[in-house]
Amino acid sequence: MPDLGTSPPIAIQPLRSALQPRHLPLPITGREPGHALLVLQDGGAVLRVPGQEDRALPTPSIHWFRPAVGERLVLEAGTVGTLALIRPDFPVRALSGQVEAPALLAMLERDGSLGSAETEGCLGAVARALEAIRAELMAPQFGAELVLAAELGLLLVALARARGLGEIDRGGAGGDARHLQRFRQLLEAHFRAHWPVGRYADQLGLSPDRLHAICQRRLGRTPKALIAERLAREAAQGLERSSLSIAQLSHALGFREPGHFSHFFKRMTGLTPRRFRGMASRPDPGGRDGGTASAAGGFTPPRFSDWP
């Protein structure tokens, strides 16, 4: 029987439903952490790194990342899925000589996720590849590592297609516009709640990387910048038009402390909220509508008309 070594290039652990939550360490024992691929079909999970905020993982979803030292996967009761741990040197060997290798390796090196909408088209292919890898590991035969390399390649191609690498290369204008329209709607509804980019991406069924690529390509700005600009525009309008105190406006915009609001607004506009309000209240000597842009040092609150 062929020998795959004391530590095979891929380790597969089915995640079967259990009555109690489970805690799983992620790095491969005695080796560099390598890559983790997590497929969640039902239930829920949390990635826990010492000293960092827990990251909740919804279902169905697929995630790939490099586990950090001490990182653990906490599975809720009833969670079903598969965890694959890939030795760090194996993807390069598995994809050696393939034209698509640079793009696939670059995708794997950056943490990524596929939400429920994106998993619909690839979950079957990913599950089949993982099952074929598990079967080969349980009873390896001649050419076992070649089989593992081929199945890993198929798995990565399925992820890349679902993540939209082909669409990005071709421009994907129609899909981009739909995603941006939905992002705009979500942003309008939730910017006061200070949602992080990852939460918007989850709601859109996209990975954060793909949402970033779409926004950069179509708008020339990152999702994080667009979120901050929307909040700054609301703040500027509130300072100019409302009678709320700065502390009251800060609370209405979701800031925990007025000091945090002041720091954010000065970073975005170059002016403190008090200075902005004072300058905006003076008439524009040029007679332009509103007066805020000239009075406030040239700051113009971004508008959604810039979006496709």
Image (cartoon, helix red, strand yellow):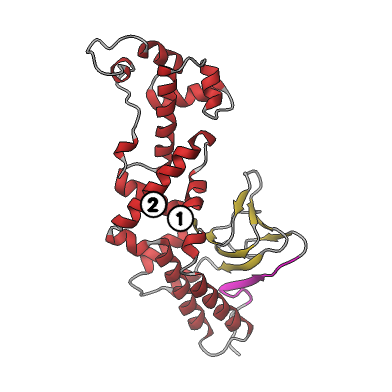
**On the rendered image, what quadrant is the N terminus found in?**
bottom right
Question: Is any atom of residue 262 visible in this view?
Answer: yes
Rendered image: mark on residue 80: none
Q: Quadrant of residue 106?
A: bottom left
Q: Which residue is mark 2?
A: 179
Residue 94 lies, in percent from the top left, at: 45, 74
Instruction: Please report whichever mark, 2 or 1, sits nearer to the chain's N-terminal start.
Output: 2
SS type, badge 2? helix
Q: Nearer the viewer, residue 147 or 123?
A: 123
- In the displayed structure, would residue 306 be above or below residue 256? below
Q: Is residue 57 left or right of residue 211?
A: right
Q: Amino acid at mark 1?
A: Leu
Marks 2,1: beta carbons within 8 A? yes
How crowded is the residue under tag 2: few (<14 C-alpha within 10 Å), some, or many (20+)? some
The stretch drawn in magenta includes residue 234: no
Q: Which residue is mark 1?
A: 206
Residue drawn at the location 55% of the way across and 19% of the way down: 248
- In the displayed structure, would residue 188 be above or below residue 34? above
**On the rendered image, what quadrant is the C terminus found in?**
top left
Give the residue at the far right of this rendering.
Answer: 19
Stretch of the chain drawn in magenta: 6-18
Question: Is any atom of residue 272 visible in this view?
Answer: no
Which of the two marks, 2 or 1, is nearer to us in this view?
2
Give the residue at the far left of this rendering.
Answer: 286
Q: Nearer the viewer, residue 297 or 133?
A: 297
